[in-house]
Image (cartoon, helix red, strand yellow):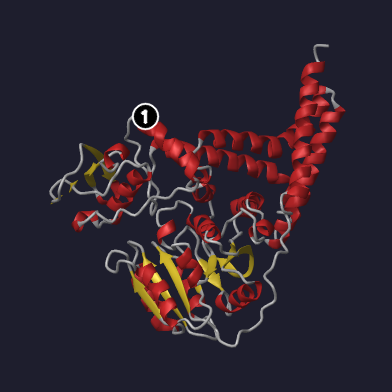
Amino acid sequence: MGQTAPVSAFVWIAAGSVAAWLWLLCCQGFFWRTDIRLPARTDPDDWPSVCVVVPARDEAAVLPDSLPSLLAQDYPGRAEIFLVDDGSSDGTGDLARELASRHGGLPLTVGSPANRPGLDRQAVGRTARNRSGTRAWPRVPLADGRGHRACSGQPAGVGGGGARTGGFDAVSLMARLRVESLWERLVVPAFVYFFAQLYPFRRIGRKGSRTAAAAGGCVLLRADAAERARIPDAIRHAVIDDVALARAVKGGGGHIWLGLAERVDSVRPYPRLHDLWRMVSRSAYAQLRHNPLLLLGTVIGLALVYLVPPVALLAGPASGSAATAALGGLAWLVMTGTYIPMLRYYGQPLWLAPLLPFTAFLYLLMTVDSAVQHYRGAVRPGRAAPTRVRTPSSARRAERSLATRGPVHAPPVDAVDGPLGAHPAVRDEVAGLALHDEVAPVLVIRASAHTVEGTVHSSREKSIAAPCCGWSVTVACRSAKERAPS
């Protein structure tokens, strides 16, 4: 009798893992399949004008491999490239101009938000002015940790033709990431596999489905859909901007599509585990809406689905329970079988498939580390991060706000004026406060030797840090109650 209870518990846990895998296999949009493709391309009589918007920050290392492939696009209609140099310190903008001069091809405009405010708006605006009939606006980001190379004819020609045929407002191609080092082989295919499990591609492309996601490697977006979804304003301070873009477009009544790319390859190397760890952990907790309960559920779910099968298979014989071992082996077998198509897509050996539980354990640790970094107040470059300097009641209010709002967005703070207020780091910090309803229009900003004058309509102030520019900033702000109309 003393051994019956624990053995029974092992059996039930292993059975739960098998049930979870059977449900994932049959009821999660066949996420494991890699054969989702756009409808066959039909060439239109009049190709729409296209603007390719390339956000880039410190991308000098990958631009020589990625930008020439964009310049060489053979799109039949009018196309131009806008590279937004987002505060690079490695000469990204100058290198882009040099590459454009050397390779020729599509016209290239290089600018930065600091000296050309609203550059992304300009790209959308030009497309709107040049339109004839249907409009299209592809966005091909390089700066979100991935440099990408597109073959000739992609993305505007092949993707655009398929988008028109399928009647899609936004089409996203998930670039084939680099898999050369040992860690890349272990982690990268699993990264795409987990993403597809979380956002089944078939559900994304289904009208009426609430599932929405995109991959930043290559996004083609119709200009009229961008206007309806208020792009880029709606995603300006989103931590996971590609997924936020898809949700904004679908929320505006748009029809979206996401699939694996055949002719868009990533040239961004992740040779060490540390590099891959940073890629995942920088946004994993944001994906969980910074909600501790969602984090706990994710950890339990990953353990049940990925860690229990090998443990049950090994622990079953040790505990004398053949049922536990059999159930664990069955769950592991189903897991391995669903991972094989992704390994084939990446051209990797099939012996990596049984190692998926180990990779899943790494992802579990990365997710927990992402939450730890969040509560320590780590600020990732290029993202509006809420300050952690607040009262306990304010912190609880902020967490409830995040839990109900979904993806992390912050409203634009247009009242930050003057040389200091225009600095991206200061604006991002202020936007982080606005995210938690702690900032009304900012009227006064003070720094070490600079003050932007204004009328104070505030009964309190908050100190925030802009570490990348070396300032300690004080902003005047009002609470939600103080902002209520009298």
Q: Tell whether 471 sits left or right of 327.
A: left
Name the quadrant containing residue 57.
Answer: bottom left
Q: Where does residue 319 sit, x and y in percent of width and height?
A: 81, 23
Q: Where does residue 283 sit, x and y in percent of width and height?
A: 49, 48
Q: Nearer the viewer, residue 103 or 216?
A: 216
- Amino acid bearing label 1: Ser
Residue at point 63%, 33% (across, down): 300
Name the quadrant containing residue 438.
Answer: top left
Q: Is residue 138 visible?
A: no
Q: Tell whether 336 sits left or right of 262.
A: right
Q: Where does residue 63 sit, x and y in percent of width and height?
A: 45, 69
Check the image and report above or below for 334 versus 139: above
Q: State which quarter of the image contains the C terminus.
A: top left
Furthest-top residue in this view? 1
Q: Nearer the viewer, residue 368 or 435?
A: 435
At numbered mark 1, what does the secondary structure look like: helix, strand or loop?
Answer: helix
Residue at point 32%, 35% (across, down): 389
Q: Tell whether 472 sits left or right of 345.
A: left
Q: Is residue 20 visible?
A: yes
Which residue is denoted by mark 1 in the rendering? 393
